[in-house]
Amino acid sequence: MNDVHPPSVVYVGVDVSAKHLDLAGLSRLKQVPNTPAGHQRLLHSLPANAHVIVEASGACEHALWITLLKAAVKVSRVNPAKVRHYARANGRLAKTDALDAQLLVLFGQGLSPQPDVLPSEQMLELQSLVSRREQLVAVHATQQVQHQQLQNDALKTQARQLMDFMEQQIKALEKNMAVLVNSAELRERSQRMQQLPGVGTVTSATLLALMPELGLHSDARICALAGLAPHPYDSGPMKGQRHIQGGRWRVRRVLYMTAICSLSHNPILKEHYKRLRQRGKPAKVAITALMRKILCVLNKLLTQPNFTLAS
């Protein structure tokens, strides 16, 4: 009796732009529009053993990513920086959309990234709300600066009215976020995270959306994903200064604000920060250490049901 071997994986690279998807790894199809119709055309052209590789370059790839996941197609949304480093390591310096799609095929073949998992509908909705809130907060901050600089009273009034409107929209988003994190799927995790002083509904919702792996991996892995793991820089007798790099900057931004808040509302973390400063650590280094500490505590709260915080 002959052994039956599963077919080898066919990696398909998709370079995403606002209007088009450039494709590599398929025999005939080379480009489709970045529209629902184009996504369906790509979907119907994929072999059964396809594994799609796409860069996480912004919002342009999100709809395609969701479409492929819902169709049970293997897809990996990979870090663009890792892809560029891989290209340089292989001497591929030229860059066009078609070449980038081919590079994604080589990246898949060389590194075999793990396929992504389809988030639940509630998680997808929470991620959309968090992203929209971040956008409005950024625009609101810009308007605040402009409001301070404007000299014309009519223009200042207009800027103030726009800020008031955005504040209403932000509050509405936060209300919807609170409803989602109080749902059956997320309530326990959110409440557990909020046991840490300085972490409220918005912070817990944001971290759940931006780092769904929280509570599923070790502290070291979670810190590495967030870009808060200090990397050694040693060579022979030389012991270089350790730095953090890479990871999810949006997560670090939330943790930074949480760390600043903790200096006023969490005596234990405040004391930890003071000890670091007394040991000669610069303020930025001490804040980063505080962010890492907060993330590890939140991870323990989710991974260890019996873990309790010191009072």
Image: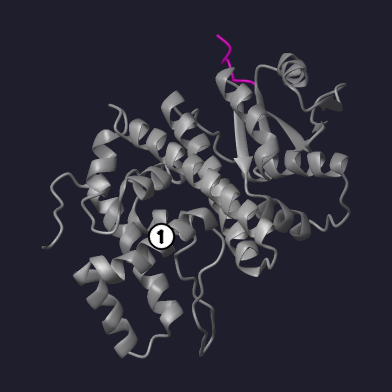
Residue drawn at 23 percent across, 56 percent down: 196
Assign the magenta stretch its main secondary structure: loop
Q: Nearer the viewer, residue 145 or 131?
A: 145
Q: Is residue 194 left or right of residue 166?
A: left
Q: Would residue 108 be counted in the magenta stretch?
A: no
Q: Quadrant of residue 99?
A: top right
Outermost residue toward the left in this view? 311
Magenta-tinted stretch? 1-9
Give the x, y percent position of residue 3. Answer: 56, 16
Outermost residue toward the front in this view? 153
Give the x, y percent position of residue 164. Answer: 52, 48
Q: Is residue 187 left or right of residue 26?
A: left
Give the x, y percent position of residue 1. Answer: 55, 9
Residue drawn at 30 percent across, 89 percent down: 278
Number of numbered labels in the structure image: 1
Residue drawn at 51 percent across, 69 percent down: 244
Give the x, y percent position of residue 76. Answer: 60, 36
| Residue 8 visible in the picture | no
Rendered-image quadrant of the C terminus: bottom left
Outermost residue toward the top in this view? 1
- Looking at the image, is 282 positioned above or below residue 31? below
- Looking at the image, is 13 positioned above or below residue 286? above
| Residue 115 visible in the picture | yes
Q: Quadrant of residue 294?
A: bottom left
Residue drawn at 42 percent across, 27 percent down: 122
Q: How is the image coloured?
A: one colour
Q: Nearer the viewer, residue 103 or 80?
A: 80
The residue pinned by badge 1 equals: 255
Q: Amino acid at mark 1?
A: Leu
Q: Is residue 106 left or right of residue 265?
A: right
| Helix, strand or loop status at disc 1 | helix
